[in-house]
Image (tube, grey):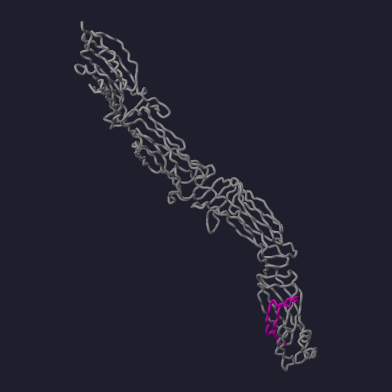
Amino acid sequence: MRKTLALLTAGLYLASCQTDTVGIDDVDIIAEPVIALPIGEINLTLDHLLVPDDSLIYDDNMDYKLVVAQDSVFSIAVDDLISLPAQSPASSSISMGTIGVNNVTMTTDISLGTVATDAGLTTINSANGSSAPFPSINETNVGTYGGGGFGTFTNASFSDGSMTLTMTNDWPTVVSMGVELVNNTSGATILTFALNNASANGGTATDTESLINKTLPNDIGFKITSLSSPGTGTNFVAIDTTDALTLDISTADLEVYSAVTALTTQDISSDTQYVDLSTGGSEELRELMFNTASFDYEFTSTLAEDLELGIGFPGSDQNGVEVDTTITIPSGQTVTGSISLDNTILDLTTDPSQNHSKLPIAVSATLLGSGNQVTIDSSDALDMTFEMTNLQFGHIKGFFGTQMISIDNGSVPLSVEFLENFEGSIAFAEPSISMDITNSIGLPIQLALDFDSYSNGTASSLNGPDYILPFPTTLGDTETGTLTYDNTNSQITDVFTLPKDSIVYGGAVNVNHDTTTFGTDNFVTNTGAISGDLLMELPFTITATGLAFGDTLAQDLNLNESLDDSTSVEDLKLFLSTTTTLPLDASITLKFYDATWNEVHMETVDLLVSGVPNANGIVTSPSVSDVEIDLSGTALEAVLNAKAVIAEATMDTYNGGSDPVKLRTDASIRLGLGVQLQLNVIR
């Protein structure tokens, strides 16, 4: 008989999933052949079944909660958003180009007597000092007069400028003259002038010619190629052979491209160059602050005079002062050095053709005149090489473009040990996923989270909203916030209807996805970053249906042989009394099998009747139920002759698993157990 009692007690063990000590006390034999045995009581609470660990916890209010936390399920660093392009050395030059020189003048007097002699006009020389008619003149190639250079330059080749030749006529008759400006050394003609109809006694005639692409040597002359006058006819005029034709040279707007000359101090260049910091995408950099940076330079001069070079960064701010420096480059030498841009804010919006991503460098060059004559050439230049080195930015402001950054797929461990032996499912009614965001990057980012659980290859998707991550609006600030997915904004209940094979997450973040709403003003510091920490909380507010499991309680049974030969059992009754605040309905089915594994008997017992939960899913009043199992006749015989027994238990939450209930640590079950046996004693 002891084996029969052990069998039934084992069935209770399986239904509760936990053993406790059963005390056999107050044993009282009431009568014979009927024996009644009050076996004792089992008192269990839910914390016998669910033992808190790293994931399974309970709050101060004794509600169970399954918690899974995972740090940095996604993170975004500065380099993921924007980076400065690699800087290669940049070269440029300032060419000497054309040089302005001072205007020059020259005067030459040609007397009447000299011309008369050279032209063979003997009547004029004969009439010197008297009054006589002035003869008509029509001569060619009279001669070349004057000589010398201009003093301030020699062998000057002009890129611009003009020369004016004015003839003042002191002769007593109208004069016209053709004059060539010639190189006295070679005889080559430089310029040709036509001086027409200068009136007598002080009249003038003027002609202006261009000097462009003309070269003036250091010895020039005036060649009279033609000379004409109508004379005075029969009118007598005073003839004085000292009267002269005065030739006056004047110049204007002189610029030379090659010369030996004395230069005055003058500006030869003033320009703003732009270093392109574009990243090649849609990014627009507007302000760049360097913690450290060096502007390295090398200047090589082939200029004939020293050069004073001004270098500045328009709009820059280095401790409240715009960066600007002056460097002197000696003639024909190379100068190297660097300009510190440490702790400097640079304005990248000043290029008229592109208001972003361009670093302005203002360069002005002044040629320092020494007063000495030097050889100059327009091809002379200052060659410049620039390079930005040791770049470590402090912050960047601008628009960092529209882009999508994928979140690497990851998995979330979720192991509920006590479910591993069950069939059926548990649905959590109040699960939540929260994402704690820490963000020091000033730009709007949309989080599109993919979160799926899988069961036998079938996915259940979260389908939650796309959130805008909290972000700072002031440079240097850090913004924090929490994004929450629950059963009000997602299909999270489907995701956490257990058991599941696996849970995975992924997705993407969309940078500057809506510039109409959020604008294009972004910023980042060199330490800026975004991180998201995942927290899953599954309070044990659940519905459960068909939580079933089974096990073989015993094999190779032979209960009849355990009875004394003088005793037989005619009737057996097992009494169960349950008092519970568990929100569970539970039944147990005992299946008895013969030696060939044919089922010979089955008993189904409603082991637990759920307490009735209130509106919050909490059972506040215990449920009491009494169960009697009567084994007699063929049922008793089948059990006594069974060779094996299998127990199958099934549990649902209250109301067939349709109403959410809470599992609490103080939920309890008390089982009272008694047995009544009717024996037949053989005398």
Q: In which quarter of the image is residue 378?
A: bottom right
Nearer to us in this view, 493 or 240? 493
Q: Is residue 70 above or below residue 201?
A: above
Q: Quadrant of the N terminus?
A: top left
Q: Residue furthest left?
A: 633
From the viewer's perspective, tell me whether residue 571 is left or right of residue 663. Answer: left
Q: Can residue 19 be seen in this view?
A: yes
Q: In this view, does 209 lie above or below 478?
A: below
Percent from the top left, x then y, of residue 497?
34, 34
Q: Which of 341 and 548 is in front in this view?
A: 548
Is residue 592 in view?
Answer: no
Give percent across and percent down for residue 594: 25, 20
Q: Does the magenta stretch include residue 187?
A: yes
> What secondary structure characterizes most of the magenta part?
strand
Number of marks present in the image shown: 0
**Quadrant in which residue 678 is drawn:** top left
In the rendering, at what x and y percent does residue 131 appear? Answer: 78, 91
Instruction: Tell me which segment is drawn in magenta.
Output: 173-198
Q: Give the x, y percent position of residue 250.
A: 70, 74
* Figure quadrant of residue 457: top left
Residue positioned most to the front: 596
- Tell me if residue 470 comes above or below residue 18 in the rendering: below
Q: Is residue 188 magenta?
A: yes
- Which residue is outermost to the top? 683
| In this picture, residue 265 sits left or right of residue 617 | right
